[in-house]
Image: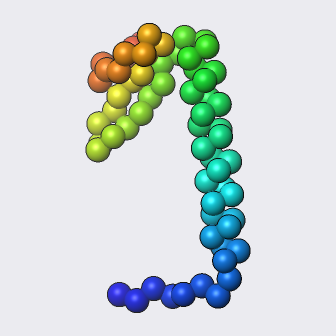
Amino acid sequence: MKSKQLESSSVYKDAFYIQKIGNRAVKSVLERNQKKNIASVFSKEGKIFYKLPSGEITEKSPFKN
């Protein structure tokens, strides 16, 4: 399969800029969660993990159902 070559690098610049904004937002939320003692939720290879305020990482949800 051939991919089309872009004539302008502006698409790449825009994509990197959007990714940069997203990375900053995620970092900010993770920091706020930690300050408020709220677990952060992550996914890796289809499994859900929770990073507890203590720094422990577990597969068991700390949230009430």
> Along the line of sight, which residue is nearer the eye, 32 or 9?
9
Position of the N terminus by quadrant: bottom left
| Quadrant position of residue 32 | top right
> Along the line of sight, which residue is nearer the eye, 42 or 20?
20
Position of the C terminus by quadrant: top left
Query: Residue, x 63% and y 63% (percent of image)?
Result: 15
Q: Is residue 63 visible?
A: no
| Quadrant position of residue 36 | top right
Q: What is the x, y in percent for residue 38?
A: 53, 15
Q: What is the x, y in percent for residue 30?
A: 57, 27
- Please tell me how many numbered marks the rendered image carries: 0
Q: Is residue 40 visible?
A: yes
Query: Residue, x 69% and y 65% (percent of image)?
Result: 14
Query: Residue, x 66% and y 73% (percent of image)?
Result: 11
Query: Residue, x 66% and y 56% (percent of image)?
Result: 18
Identify whether 9 is placed above or below 25.
below
| Quadrant position of residue 49 | top left
Identify whether 36 is placed above or below 46.
above
Q: What is the x, y in percent for residue 3?
A: 45, 85
Q: What is the x, y in percent for residue 40?
A: 48, 24
